[in-house]
Amino acid sequence: MSNLDRQATPSVCGGRGFVVAEPVRELLSPRRVQLGESTEVRRLLPNLGRRMVGAWAFVDHYGPDDIADEPGMQVPPHPHMGLQTVSWLHEGQVLHRDSTGSLATILPRELGLMTSGRAISHSEESPKPHARLLHGAQLWVALPDEHRDVEPHFQHHTDLPTVTAPGLTATVILGDLDGAASPGTTYTPLVGADLALAHGAEARVPLDPDFEYAVLAMSGEAHVDGVPVLPGSMLYLGCGRTELPLRAESDAGLMLLGGEPFEEEIVMWWNFIGRSHEEIEAARRDWTEGSRFGEVHGYDGGPLPAPELPPVALKPRGRVR
């Protein structure tokens, strides 16, 4: 669950200036980024012109990759602060270790939820041996100011609630959907759900008009509110919706992401979310020189070095639409 970009640039996210207060259909194209030794991801958030969806601040989609003769995911120990990470798989396994002593193998449609709070470090890798295919999404949720220094912890939920309709099974990853609530801890009103659609299915998913939403296409071909979305793309939907029409042209997998617009402006750089350039600078220094982020035991290799931080502080700029 890492940003391994060696040219990472700070970005200002959040605030109402970026929120679209009405229903829209804004198709986002990904940026390709190398994650570890053998995994390439498609980065959908942050995106040019679209930084967050509710508290969702970072979205990568990867695979399906054939890693039968490859090491698969190999992400060395690295730090996080001010956020939660969400591991979500359709195929494969990810072995998680962190500086609180957590050790877990996450399987398809199980929730791996790590709350960094003030500081944590972790590694992620494909176990040995591992399945032939690796396919999933990696996401971050920004923590609001009142909770961003909570005690770091990890949750692994193997049994998540589902909502069903003809041709549709929705697994509730975080928050609640149509009365079904995930056991994962959240700190702002939001929702994350995995939508499995059968070929030819037509369904309408209930939404909260106060939330802003987006849909990430994982597999197959589906139309979301009439817009065709292909795997690795994301459709931003804005606010003000009470339901979302879906139609599957094949068996298809989607992720629904939404939440109340995130009021606070945040600074996001590398694997940190803070409120100022100075906070980010201090976190980088602590990872490089100190012990604030703890130590990950059991990973075969050294920690990930931090990239250089540009010296000029960002000045937040909102956008009104």
Image (tube, helix red, strand yellow):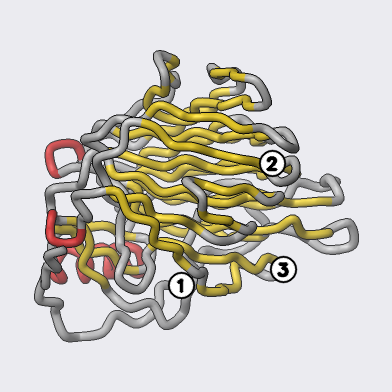
Q: Is residue 77 visible?
A: yes
Q: Quadrant of residue 190?
A: top left
Q: Earlier in the sequence, mark 2 or mark 1?
A: 2
Of 288 and 272, nearer the camera is: 272
Of 44 and 242, nearer the camera is: 242
Query: Closer to the observer: label 2 or label 1?
Result: 2
Q: Are marks 1 and 3 in contact (CB under 8 Å)?
A: no
Q: Residue at x 84, y 45 (%)?
A: 131
Q: Residue at x 83, y 63 (%)?
A: 70
Which residue lies under the disc numbered 1? 305
Q: Residue at x 30, y 70 (%)?
A: 49
Mark sitting on residue 90: 2
Which residue lies under the disc numbered 3? 38
In which quadrant of the rendered image does the C terminus lie? bottom left
Q: Secondary structure at mark 1?
A: loop
Query: Closer to the observer: label 3 or label 2?
Result: 2
Instruction: Tell me if mark 3 has few (under 14), some (14-19) or many (20+) residues whose alpha carbon lies within 10 angstroms of its own.
Output: some
Q: Is residue 129 above or below residue 191?
A: below
